[in-house]
Image (spheres, rainbow, N blue to C red):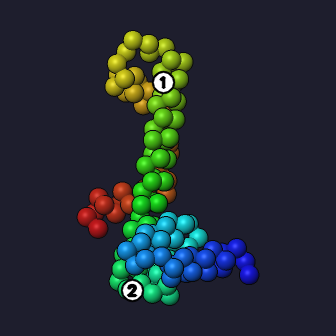
Amino acid sequence: MNPIEQLVNSFQDLVGQVPEIIQPVIVMLAGAIPFIEGEVASLIGVVGGLNPIMAGIAAAGGNFLCVLLVVLLTSRARAAVVNRRTARVVADVGFAGVPESAADAALQESAPAKPESKGRKRFTHLSVFGL
């Protein structure tokens, strides 16, 4: 038996052994695991004896909370990296003492424009004609 099958079986056993009030919490925890996610977690809840609607809601809730946590953590990390990079570029270019908005405008003016892609040209051409 592979590790994922063992994990699913252990969750099913756990759901069957705990009181009914705690069963949705177990299904939420199963839904937060990336390889199990909502679909398998709801199946675990149903096999464990939970109402299918409650199992589905709990599994989706666990999956949603896990994804929300990952998005919030990575967005803060990305913002920190972008802010650090902007501060470094501003310091390298020599905009010390200039407000950030003016420094950002100067950086955008000095950055070379990317050439327009073939698809973007087609889209622009079609949008001129109202299509």
Residue 10 quadrant: bottom right
Location of residue 63 in the rendering, given as x and y in whole percent from the top left corner: 45, 67
Q: Given the current orientation, which residue lies at the most extreme right position?
A: 1
Q: Closest to the observer: 108 or 53? A: 53
Q: Residues within 10 Å of mark 1 (few under 14, many from 20)?
A: some
- Amino acid on which disc 2 is placed: Pro
Which element type, helix, strand or loop, lies under badge 2? helix
Location of residue 47 in the rendering, given as x and y in whole percent from the top left corner: 50, 88
Residue at 45% in and 38% down: 79
- Residue 3 visible in the shown view: yes
Where is mark 1, residue-wise? 87
Residue at 44% in and 13% down: 96
Quarter of the figure that contains the N terminus: bottom right
Quick check: 39 above or below 130?
Answer: below
- Amino acid on which disc 1 is placed: Ala
Q: Residues within 10 Å of mark 2 (few under 14, many from 20)?
A: some
Where is mark 2, residue-wise? 52
Quarter of the figure that contains the C terminus: bottom left
Quick check: 23 above or below 78?
Answer: below
Q: Given the current orientation, which residue lies at the most extreme left position?
A: 130
